Amino acid sequence: MSNSNQSIVQFSLDSIVKKNILEKISLFSSKKILVIGDVGVDEYVMGAVKRISPEAPVPVLEVTDEDKRIGLAANVAQNVVSLGGQVELVSVVGADTGADILRDLLKNSRVGSQSLVVDEKRPTTRKTRVMTGHHHLVRVDYEVRKNLSAETEIKILNRVQEILPTIDIVVLEDYAKGIFSITLVEKIVALAKKSGKYLMVDPHQTKFADFYKGVDLIKPNYNEALALTQIHEEDIENPTERVLAVGRALQKTTGAKDIVLTQGKDGMSIFSSDSAVVQVPTFAKKVFDVTGAGDTVIAALALGVSAGLSLAEACVMANYAAGIVVGKIGCVPCEMSELTAAVKG
Protein backbone atom coordinates (compact mmCIF):
# COMPACT_ATOMS: atom_id res chain seq x y z
CA MET A 1 0.00 0.00 0.00
CA SER A 2 2.93 2.35 -0.31
CA ASN A 3 4.53 4.27 -3.08
CA SER A 4 7.95 5.93 -2.83
CA ASN A 5 8.13 5.25 0.94
CA GLN A 6 4.65 6.71 1.44
CA SER A 7 2.01 4.79 3.34
CA ILE A 8 -1.64 5.15 4.35
CA VAL A 9 -2.49 4.68 8.01
CA GLN A 10 -6.08 4.07 9.15
CA PHE A 11 -7.14 6.51 11.87
CA SER A 12 -8.09 4.74 15.08
CA LEU A 13 -11.34 6.13 16.52
CA ASP A 14 -11.68 5.30 20.22
CA SER A 15 -13.48 6.64 23.30
CA ILE A 16 -10.57 9.01 24.13
CA VAL A 17 -10.78 10.65 20.68
CA LYS A 18 -14.58 10.96 20.99
CA LYS A 19 -14.25 12.51 24.46
CA ASN A 20 -11.71 15.02 23.15
CA ILE A 21 -13.96 15.95 20.18
CA LEU A 22 -16.94 16.51 22.50
CA GLU A 23 -14.85 18.70 24.81
CA LYS A 24 -13.65 20.83 21.89
CA ILE A 25 -17.18 21.20 20.43
CA SER A 26 -18.08 23.02 23.64
CA LEU A 27 -15.42 25.65 22.78
CA PHE A 28 -16.93 26.53 19.38
CA SER A 29 -18.98 29.40 20.80
CA SER A 30 -15.76 31.36 21.44
CA LYS A 31 -14.35 30.78 17.93
CA LYS A 32 -14.84 33.08 14.95
CA ILE A 33 -14.31 32.03 11.33
CA LEU A 34 -13.87 34.43 8.41
CA VAL A 35 -15.55 33.01 5.29
CA ILE A 36 -14.70 34.69 1.96
CA GLY A 37 -16.32 33.48 -1.25
CA ASP A 38 -19.10 33.55 -3.81
CA VAL A 39 -22.59 33.74 -2.30
CA GLY A 40 -26.04 33.14 -3.72
CA VAL A 41 -29.65 32.15 -3.24
CA ASP A 42 -31.13 28.76 -4.17
CA GLU A 43 -34.81 29.12 -5.06
CA TYR A 44 -37.27 26.30 -5.64
CA VAL A 45 -40.64 26.73 -7.36
CA MET A 46 -42.63 23.49 -7.01
CA GLY A 47 -45.98 22.35 -8.30
CA ALA A 48 -47.98 20.04 -10.56
CA VAL A 49 -48.15 19.82 -14.35
CA LYS A 50 -51.60 18.92 -15.65
CA ARG A 51 -51.67 20.54 -19.08
CA ILE A 52 -49.68 21.98 -21.95
CA SER A 53 -49.75 25.72 -22.58
CA PRO A 54 -51.99 26.90 -25.46
CA GLU A 55 -49.37 29.61 -26.18
CA ALA A 56 -46.45 27.25 -26.86
CA PRO A 57 -45.76 23.49 -26.56
CA VAL A 58 -44.53 23.77 -22.97
CA PRO A 59 -45.86 22.36 -19.67
CA VAL A 60 -47.84 24.67 -17.38
CA LEU A 61 -46.73 24.43 -13.76
CA GLU A 62 -49.45 25.08 -11.19
CA VAL A 63 -47.36 26.34 -8.27
CA THR A 64 -48.04 24.76 -4.87
CA ASP A 65 -44.91 25.71 -2.96
CA GLU A 66 -41.87 27.98 -3.04
CA ASP A 67 -38.67 27.71 -1.04
CA LYS A 68 -35.60 29.94 -0.76
CA ARG A 69 -32.29 28.81 0.74
CA ILE A 70 -28.83 30.17 1.36
CA GLY A 71 -26.35 28.92 -1.23
CA LEU A 72 -22.63 28.72 -2.06
CA ALA A 73 -20.19 30.21 0.50
CA ALA A 74 -23.10 31.64 2.50
CA ASN A 75 -23.98 28.02 3.34
CA VAL A 76 -20.49 27.57 4.86
CA ALA A 77 -21.17 30.62 7.06
CA GLN A 78 -24.59 29.20 7.97
CA ASN A 79 -22.96 25.91 9.00
CA VAL A 80 -20.39 27.69 11.21
CA VAL A 81 -23.26 29.32 13.13
CA SER A 82 -25.45 26.20 13.30
CA LEU A 83 -22.45 24.30 14.73
CA GLY A 84 -22.21 26.88 17.52
CA GLY A 85 -19.44 29.16 16.19
CA GLN A 86 -19.27 32.81 15.18
CA VAL A 87 -18.74 33.92 11.59
CA GLU A 88 -17.83 36.90 9.41
CA LEU A 89 -18.93 36.59 5.78
CA VAL A 90 -17.17 38.67 3.11
CA SER A 91 -18.55 38.59 -0.42
CA VAL A 92 -20.10 40.58 -3.26
CA VAL A 93 -23.79 41.08 -4.03
CA GLY A 94 -25.69 43.23 -6.49
CA ALA A 95 -28.09 46.09 -5.75
CA ASP A 96 -31.11 43.91 -6.46
CA THR A 97 -33.92 41.70 -5.16
CA GLY A 98 -31.53 38.75 -4.85
CA ALA A 99 -29.40 40.70 -2.36
CA ASP A 100 -32.50 41.57 -0.29
CA ILE A 101 -33.59 37.92 -0.23
CA LEU A 102 -30.08 36.80 0.74
CA ARG A 103 -29.82 39.33 3.58
CA ASP A 104 -33.17 38.16 4.99
CA LEU A 105 -32.11 34.51 4.78
CA LEU A 106 -28.77 35.30 6.46
CA LYS A 107 -30.56 37.20 9.23
CA ASN A 108 -32.83 34.20 9.85
CA SER A 109 -29.71 32.00 10.09
CA ARG A 110 -28.01 34.45 12.51
CA VAL A 111 -25.29 35.31 9.95
CA GLY A 112 -24.35 38.99 9.66
CA SER A 113 -24.48 40.62 6.22
CA GLN A 114 -22.58 43.79 7.14
CA SER A 115 -19.46 42.69 5.22
CA LEU A 116 -21.21 42.07 1.90
CA VAL A 117 -19.79 44.49 -0.68
CA VAL A 118 -22.37 45.89 -3.14
CA ASP A 119 -21.44 46.03 -6.83
CA GLU A 120 -24.27 47.60 -8.83
CA LYS A 121 -22.87 46.24 -12.10
CA ARG A 122 -23.30 42.58 -11.05
CA PRO A 123 -26.44 40.64 -10.17
CA THR A 124 -26.61 38.65 -6.95
CA THR A 125 -26.24 34.98 -7.91
CA ARG A 126 -29.64 33.26 -7.86
CA LYS A 127 -30.52 29.82 -9.13
CA THR A 128 -34.25 29.23 -9.53
CA ARG A 129 -35.24 25.60 -10.03
CA VAL A 130 -38.74 24.99 -11.38
CA MET A 131 -39.79 21.48 -10.40
CA THR A 132 -42.62 19.01 -10.45
CA GLY A 133 -41.98 16.21 -7.96
CA HIS A 134 -38.28 15.32 -8.31
CA HIS A 135 -38.20 16.43 -11.96
CA HIS A 136 -36.57 19.71 -13.00
CA LEU A 137 -38.55 21.49 -15.71
CA VAL A 138 -36.06 24.35 -16.04
CA ARG A 139 -33.40 26.19 -14.07
CA VAL A 140 -33.11 29.97 -14.31
CA ASP A 141 -29.72 31.49 -13.37
CA TYR A 142 -29.07 35.12 -12.52
CA GLU A 143 -25.31 35.52 -12.46
CA VAL A 144 -22.18 37.01 -13.99
CA ARG A 145 -19.01 34.95 -13.72
CA LYS A 146 -16.44 37.51 -14.81
CA ASN A 147 -13.82 38.78 -12.36
CA LEU A 148 -14.53 41.67 -10.02
CA SER A 149 -13.56 45.22 -10.92
CA ALA A 150 -10.34 46.55 -9.33
CA GLU A 151 -12.50 48.89 -7.22
CA THR A 152 -14.60 46.03 -5.80
CA GLU A 153 -11.48 43.92 -5.12
CA ILE A 154 -10.02 46.77 -3.05
CA LYS A 155 -13.26 46.96 -1.02
CA ILE A 156 -13.06 43.21 -0.36
CA LEU A 157 -9.43 43.48 0.77
CA ASN A 158 -10.22 46.42 3.04
CA ARG A 159 -13.00 44.41 4.74
CA VAL A 160 -10.69 41.41 5.14
CA GLN A 161 -7.94 43.57 6.64
CA GLU A 162 -10.38 45.11 9.15
CA ILE A 163 -11.79 41.74 10.23
CA LEU A 164 -8.57 39.65 10.39
CA PRO A 165 -7.48 40.67 13.93
CA THR A 166 -10.84 39.49 15.35
CA ILE A 167 -10.98 35.98 13.85
CA ASP A 168 -9.33 32.57 14.40
CA ILE A 169 -9.27 30.98 10.94
CA VAL A 170 -9.83 32.13 7.33
CA VAL A 171 -11.79 30.01 4.84
CA LEU A 172 -11.78 30.73 1.09
CA GLU A 173 -14.82 29.10 -0.53
CA ASP A 174 -14.40 29.18 -4.32
CA TYR A 175 -17.47 28.48 -6.47
CA ALA A 176 -15.90 30.11 -9.56
CA LYS A 177 -18.52 32.87 -9.82
CA GLY A 178 -15.82 35.51 -10.21
CA ILE A 179 -14.95 36.71 -6.71
CA PHE A 180 -11.45 35.19 -6.71
CA SER A 181 -8.78 36.36 -9.11
CA ILE A 182 -5.23 35.04 -8.69
CA THR A 183 -4.25 38.54 -7.47
CA LEU A 184 -6.96 38.60 -4.79
CA VAL A 185 -5.95 35.13 -3.54
CA GLU A 186 -2.28 36.23 -3.39
CA LYS A 187 -3.20 39.34 -1.39
CA ILE A 188 -5.44 37.44 1.05
CA VAL A 189 -2.67 34.83 1.53
CA ALA A 190 -0.20 37.64 2.31
CA LEU A 191 -2.60 39.30 4.79
CA ALA A 192 -3.33 35.97 6.54
CA LYS A 193 0.40 35.18 6.83
CA LYS A 194 1.14 38.66 8.19
CA SER A 195 -1.64 38.24 10.80
CA GLY A 196 -0.57 34.67 11.65
CA LYS A 197 -4.00 33.27 10.67
CA TYR A 198 -4.41 29.70 9.40
CA LEU A 199 -5.92 29.79 5.87
CA MET A 200 -8.08 27.00 4.44
CA VAL A 201 -9.43 26.80 0.90
CA ASP A 202 -12.26 24.81 -0.63
CA PRO A 203 -11.09 24.93 -4.27
CA HIS A 204 -12.89 24.85 -7.61
CA GLN A 205 -11.89 22.32 -10.25
CA THR A 206 -11.79 24.90 -13.06
CA LYS A 207 -8.64 26.41 -11.52
CA PHE A 208 -5.05 25.17 -11.55
CA ALA A 209 -3.50 24.09 -8.25
CA ASP A 210 -1.04 27.00 -8.18
CA PHE A 211 -4.00 29.42 -8.21
CA TYR A 212 -4.15 28.67 -4.46
CA LYS A 213 -0.41 28.94 -3.78
CA GLY A 214 0.48 29.78 -0.19
CA VAL A 215 -2.66 28.52 1.60
CA ASP A 216 -2.19 26.36 4.71
CA LEU A 217 -4.83 23.74 3.90
CA ILE A 218 -6.65 22.78 0.71
CA LYS A 219 -9.77 20.56 0.77
CA PRO A 220 -10.73 19.24 -2.66
CA ASN A 221 -12.83 16.18 -3.37
CA TYR A 222 -11.12 13.47 -5.42
CA ASN A 223 -12.40 14.65 -8.82
CA GLU A 224 -11.47 18.27 -8.06
CA ALA A 225 -7.98 17.13 -7.04
CA LEU A 226 -7.53 15.28 -10.35
CA ALA A 227 -8.58 18.40 -12.28
CA LEU A 228 -6.41 20.76 -10.20
CA THR A 229 -3.29 18.63 -10.63
CA GLN A 230 -4.12 17.53 -14.21
CA ILE A 231 -3.28 13.94 -13.28
CA HIS A 232 -5.02 11.39 -15.51
CA GLU A 233 -6.55 8.44 -13.64
CA GLU A 234 -5.65 5.97 -16.38
CA ASP A 235 -1.94 6.78 -15.96
CA ILE A 236 -1.90 5.23 -12.46
CA GLU A 237 -3.47 1.78 -12.24
CA ASN A 238 -3.45 1.29 -8.45
CA PRO A 239 -6.22 3.41 -6.78
CA THR A 240 -4.18 3.85 -3.57
CA GLU A 241 -1.13 5.09 -5.47
CA ARG A 242 -3.44 7.39 -7.42
CA VAL A 243 -4.68 9.04 -4.20
CA LEU A 244 -1.09 9.39 -2.95
CA ALA A 245 0.10 10.90 -6.24
CA VAL A 246 -2.74 13.44 -6.37
CA GLY A 247 -2.32 14.50 -2.72
CA ARG A 248 1.45 14.92 -2.93
CA ALA A 249 1.19 16.82 -6.25
CA LEU A 250 -1.27 19.25 -4.66
CA GLN A 251 1.04 19.70 -1.67
CA LYS A 252 4.03 20.40 -3.90
CA THR A 253 2.24 22.84 -6.24
CA THR A 254 0.32 24.86 -3.63
CA GLY A 255 2.93 24.67 -0.86
CA ALA A 256 0.07 23.78 1.49
CA LYS A 257 1.17 22.07 4.69
CA ASP A 258 -2.10 20.13 4.85
CA ILE A 259 -4.26 18.48 2.19
CA VAL A 260 -7.64 16.98 3.07
CA LEU A 261 -8.81 14.86 0.13
CA THR A 262 -12.49 13.92 0.50
CA GLN A 263 -13.64 10.70 -1.15
CA GLY A 264 -17.34 10.25 -0.39
CA LYS A 265 -18.05 6.79 1.00
CA ASP A 266 -14.29 6.14 1.27
CA GLY A 267 -13.85 8.92 3.83
CA MET A 268 -10.91 11.33 3.74
CA SER A 269 -7.16 11.12 3.14
CA ILE A 270 -5.09 13.60 5.15
CA PHE A 271 -1.68 14.66 3.86
CA SER A 272 0.43 16.62 6.31
CA SER A 273 4.16 17.33 6.49
CA ASP A 274 4.73 13.81 7.88
CA SER A 275 5.38 10.87 5.56
CA ALA A 276 2.31 8.83 6.55
CA VAL A 277 -1.08 9.66 5.04
CA VAL A 278 -3.99 9.27 7.46
CA GLN A 279 -7.27 7.75 6.26
CA VAL A 280 -10.41 8.78 8.17
CA PRO A 281 -13.65 6.77 7.73
CA THR A 282 -17.05 8.17 6.76
CA PHE A 283 -20.03 8.02 9.14
CA ALA A 284 -23.01 8.47 6.78
CA LYS A 285 -25.80 6.00 7.61
CA LYS A 286 -28.14 7.01 4.78
CA VAL A 287 -27.31 9.19 1.78
CA PHE A 288 -30.28 11.10 0.34
CA ASP A 289 -28.60 14.24 -0.99
CA VAL A 290 -24.91 15.27 -1.01
CA THR A 291 -25.76 18.94 -1.73
CA GLY A 292 -23.91 21.19 0.69
CA ALA A 293 -21.95 18.40 2.38
CA GLY A 294 -18.63 19.97 1.34
CA ASP A 295 -19.72 23.27 2.89
CA THR A 296 -20.49 21.49 6.17
CA VAL A 297 -17.09 19.75 6.10
CA ILE A 298 -15.03 22.94 5.68
CA ALA A 299 -17.09 24.75 8.37
CA ALA A 300 -16.58 21.88 10.82
CA LEU A 301 -12.86 21.61 9.96
CA ALA A 302 -12.32 25.32 10.60
CA LEU A 303 -14.09 25.18 13.97
CA GLY A 304 -12.35 21.94 14.97
CA VAL A 305 -8.84 23.19 14.17
CA SER A 306 -9.50 26.59 15.81
CA ALA A 307 -10.71 24.80 18.96
CA GLY A 308 -7.47 22.81 19.19
CA LEU A 309 -8.31 19.45 17.63
CA SER A 310 -5.60 17.73 15.61
CA LEU A 311 -6.34 17.77 11.88
CA ALA A 312 -7.22 14.06 11.94
CA GLU A 313 -9.64 14.57 14.85
CA ALA A 314 -11.16 17.61 13.11
CA CYS A 315 -11.66 15.46 9.99
CA VAL A 316 -13.38 12.76 12.03
CA MET A 317 -15.72 15.38 13.47
CA ALA A 318 -16.32 16.90 10.01
CA ASN A 319 -17.22 13.45 8.67
CA TYR A 320 -19.79 13.03 11.45
CA ALA A 321 -21.28 16.42 10.46
CA ALA A 322 -21.29 15.50 6.75
CA GLY A 323 -22.92 12.16 7.60
CA ILE A 324 -25.81 14.12 9.13
CA VAL A 325 -26.42 16.53 6.23
CA VAL A 326 -26.32 13.89 3.48
CA GLY A 327 -29.24 12.23 5.29
CA LYS A 328 -31.35 15.37 4.65
CA ILE A 329 -32.84 16.72 1.43
CA GLY A 330 -31.38 19.94 0.02
CA CYS A 331 -28.78 22.36 1.31
CA VAL A 332 -29.45 22.07 5.06
CA PRO A 333 -26.85 22.87 7.76
CA CYS A 334 -25.73 20.56 10.57
CA GLU A 335 -26.85 21.59 14.06
CA MET A 336 -24.49 21.43 17.04
CA SER A 337 -26.95 19.18 18.95
CA GLU A 338 -27.05 16.70 16.01
CA LEU A 339 -23.26 16.62 15.84
CA THR A 340 -22.88 16.03 19.59
CA ALA A 341 -25.47 13.21 19.48
CA ALA A 342 -23.74 11.59 16.47
CA VAL A 343 -20.29 11.63 18.13
CA LYS A 344 -21.73 10.19 21.37
CA GLY A 345 -23.36 7.60 19.12
Image (cartoon, rainbow, N blue to C red):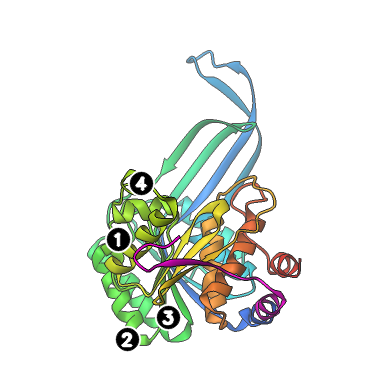
Q: Amino acid at mark 3?
A: Ile
Q: Between marks 2 and 3, how big is the CA–CA gap?
A: 13 Å
Q: Which region of the structure is painted magenta?
A: 1-21
Q: In the image, which is nearer the foreground, mark 4 or mark 1?
A: 4
Residue 102: where, in percent of width, then height? 52, 57
325 or 223, nearer to the observer: 223
Nearer-N-terminus badge (1/3): 3
Which residue bears the numbered disc 4? 233
Nearer-N-terminus badge (4/1): 1
Marks 2/4 in contact by CB < 8 Å: the verdict is no
Left or right of 131, for residue 35: left
Which residue bears the numbered disc 2? 194
Q: Amino acid at mark 4?
A: Glu
Graded by Cα atoms within 10 Å as few (under 14), some (14 to 19) or many (20 or more), the crowding at tag 2 reads few
313 or 202, nearer to the observer: 313
Graded by Cα atoms within 10 Å as few (under 14), some (14 to 19) or many (20 or more), the crowding at tag 3 reads some
Residue 209 lies in the magenta-colored region: no
Q: Between marks 1 and 2, how big is the CA–CA gap?
A: 22 Å
Nearer-N-terminus badge (2/3): 3
Judging from the image, what secondary structure is the residue with disc 3 in? helix
Residue at 26% x, 71% y: name it: 186
Nearer-N-terminus badge (2/4): 2
Which residue bears the numbered disc 1? 209
Residue at 61% x, 58% y: name it: 282
Q: In the image, which is nearer the foreground, mark 1 or mark 3?
A: 1
Judging from the image, what secondary structure is the residue with disc 4 in? helix
Q: Amino acid at mark 2?
A: Lys
Nearer-N-terminus badge (1/2): 2
Residue 163 is marked as: 3
36 or 246, nearer to the observer: 246
Q: Amino acid at mark 1?
A: Ala
Q: Between marks 4 and 3, how big is the CA–CA gap?
A: 41 Å
